Amino acid sequence: MKKFIKVALVLMGILVLFLLIAKITMKLSAPNDWPNKINLLKVVFYVEMTYLLLSFRTVKPKQLAAFLFFEKPITEVGPGLKLVPLGICSLAIETRLTQQFQFPGDPEDVDKTGENIIASGKVAPIRVTHAGSTNPDPEPLERRMTTEVSALCRFRINAYLTFLKTIGSIQEMHRQIRDTVEVELKIQLAQRTVSKTLSEWDAINKILKTKVQDLTSGWGVLIEDVQMVDLDLGKTVNEALRDLPAAELRSKKLAVDGDADSNYTRKTKQAEADGLEYVLLAEAKGAEKKAAIARDENGRFVLYLETMDQAFKNAKHTIIAGGGDIFSSVASISTVLEKIKEGGQK
């Protein structure tokens, strides 16, 4: 503030000096000379008043301001009406409120096309390659992949004169913080899989904040927060992860269907085998009964009759008298029947 007062006093002294020079010039000139004709003293006075009016600046309550003498920071000034000599001095003004940087830029300004040529008015994304899991069959988020990450930094200038002397401008501050954040993100994420990055999100943010605080120490800046705000896996990976649950369900369904078909086939074959076993057992029991019957002469006759009856049912021809074996068999049957009748009469 003292430096500002000194500059103001010097300015006022220069203005008064110009007035004195004008008055002396008029006295030394003849009445018809131009200094007296135009009233040089009055002209100088009006010019100085105009200059003073043009030299006033206003600093608002939410602004920080510093007085610059030929662009050299002299002192900070508070809010209110300030006299800033035009052409000699100037005011540097910045907000005293919290500000925010987003890296690599605001979401709408980041080029997401994936092309090598950045579109006009866009900024390139920050691409980071993550570590991959040593597991031979890792989960999707454990695989080695490249993502696009964005981060933000919130800060407030608390010593404007120091800020101007050390870093100079918000633009230069933005550039240096951006480079630091980008480098640190690549270092930290290269050591982590995507899954581990998500689980250690807060820890990474603390590391970023510490790095930026170390960078800006002595800049007259208070770093309030530094954090990652987005981890973009890209359209292809996002769609694959989105479809993964459905794919897993389809895979499980196919496995269940395959097991069901296998069980059905196995049970069907088992049933067929059991049925065949029952048929064979039944036939075996029937054969045993027939063998017991065949031990008796009459029993053998009955079996013979059953066999011939079955043969006649399956035959596709007509019996003709004197026609060979079939006719002889019928004749034999008649003879046996007669013997049975005789036996019954006895």
Image (cartoon, rainbow, N blue to C red):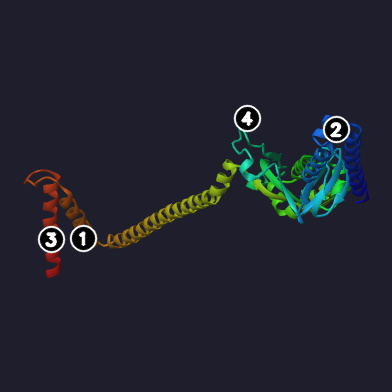
- Mark 2 or 1, nearer chain start: 2
Disc 2 is placed on an element classified as: loop
Judging by the rendered image, the residue that carries numbered circle 3 is 337
Q: Is residue 23 visible from the viewing direction of this image?
A: yes
Q: Residues within 10 Å of mark 3 (few under 14, many from 20)?
A: few
Quarter of the view holding residue 343: bottom left
Side (left or right) of 218 relative to 231: right
Nearer the observer, disc 2 or disc 3? 2
Residue 31's disc number: 2
Which residue is disc 4 drawn over? 117
Would you identify the image quadrant in which residue 136 lies? top right
Query: What amino acid is at disc 3?
Result: Leu
Name the residue carrying label 1. Answer: 302
Please state which amino acid type lies under the numbered disc 2: Pro
Which three-letter amino acid code belongs to the residue tagged 1? Val
Q: Position of residue 207 (x, y in %)?
A: 80, 50
Residue furthest left in the image: 321
Compare marks 1 and 3 and give the one earlier in the sequence: 1
